[in-house]
Image (tube, helix red, strand yellow):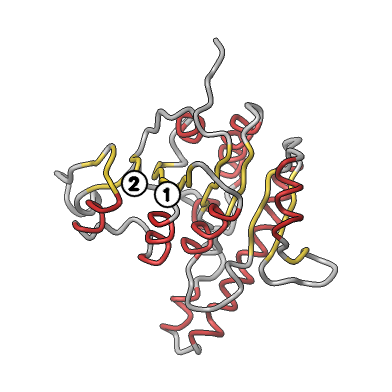
Amino acid sequence: MQQTVKYKRVLLKLSGEALMGEQDTMFDKATVDAIITQIKQVVDLGVKLGIVIGGGNIFRGINGSELGLNRANADAMGMLATVMNGIALKDFLTNAGIESKLYSALAITNMVKGYNHDSMISRLESGNVIIFAGGIGNPFFTTDSTAALRAIEMNAEILIKATKVDGVYDSDPKVNLTATKYYNISFDEAIKQNLKVMDMSAFDLCRTHKVNIDVCNIFKVNSLLDSVLGQTQGTLIHV
């Protein structure tokens, strides 16, 4: 049966921790293979896809500052961790027969091309999956903010935040077993209830530029596919 794609231009925010699965290693092969399979499902439908990759499986800037590192330096290390993940993700995609282009807000000569908007759009239109690494290139901004910014720059129709939780709840479902899940909720209502979906700067960027957010569990089968079909298994946050 022909599947009708609702969102043909998508930004996927993928955390570094997602690449670990339930293991205590930088990458878990079974988990990575499952994520790449989901990505291939949507790419094969002709979806123009950008991916902002985090670095939490290697290093988190916020954790470094708690250890006594200067916050700006800790964030720089976190950005470098996303570049490492970006290089790995490009190889994972290549092994699955998916063409991709890696850009970094931190240009690293002979290793990673520095981010350029026009080049990115050209590659995206030619069918490449675009991998965004290096955050936005400055400290004190999360990869959530990077995802919001890159979604706007690539004219994405939806920002899909792939997490380990299957949507947005009124309280932490790991702590409160009776937490209520929202299947759709407005930006204004989410802000009013102080729901911890993304950091506020990222959230405000998406609201201002009318980029809806789909929060889903990347570990659920077909979750990414269902999201691009407009049938999310998670929560849609809308203008």
Q: Spatial distance from mark 1 to mark 2, Cα to Cα?
A: 6 Å
Type of amino acid at the residue the image marks with label 1: Lys
> What residue would you read off at disc 2?
239
Extreme residue toward the right, this view: 110
Residue 9 picture location, percent across and down: 58, 39
Judge the density around disc 2: few (<14), some (14-19), many (≥20) Cα neighbours within 10 Å.
some
In the displayed structure, would residue 60 be above or below residue 152? below
Q: Is residue 205 found left or right of 185 in the rendered image?
A: right
Residues 153 and 85: in front is 153
Q: Is residue 153 found left or right of 185 in the rendered image?
A: right
Residue 41 picture location, percent across and down: 60, 29
Q: Do the residues labelled 1 and 2 touch (CB within 8 Å)?
A: yes
The answer to which quarter of the image holds residue 107 is: bottom right
Question: Residue at horizontal 54%, vertical 54%?
Answer: 152
Type of amino acid at the residue the image marks with label 2: Val
> What residue would you read off at disc 1?
210
Q: Label 1's element? A: loop
Question: Residue at horizontal 43%, vertical 60%?
Answer: 205
Quadrant where the N terminus sits is top right
Question: Residue at horizontal 48%, vertical 72%?
Answer: 141
Q: How many labels does the image show?
A: 2
Residues 59 and 130: in front is 130
Judge the density around disc 1: few (<14), some (14-19), many (≥20) Cα neighbours within 10 Å.
some
Residue 189 picture location, percent across and down: 22, 51
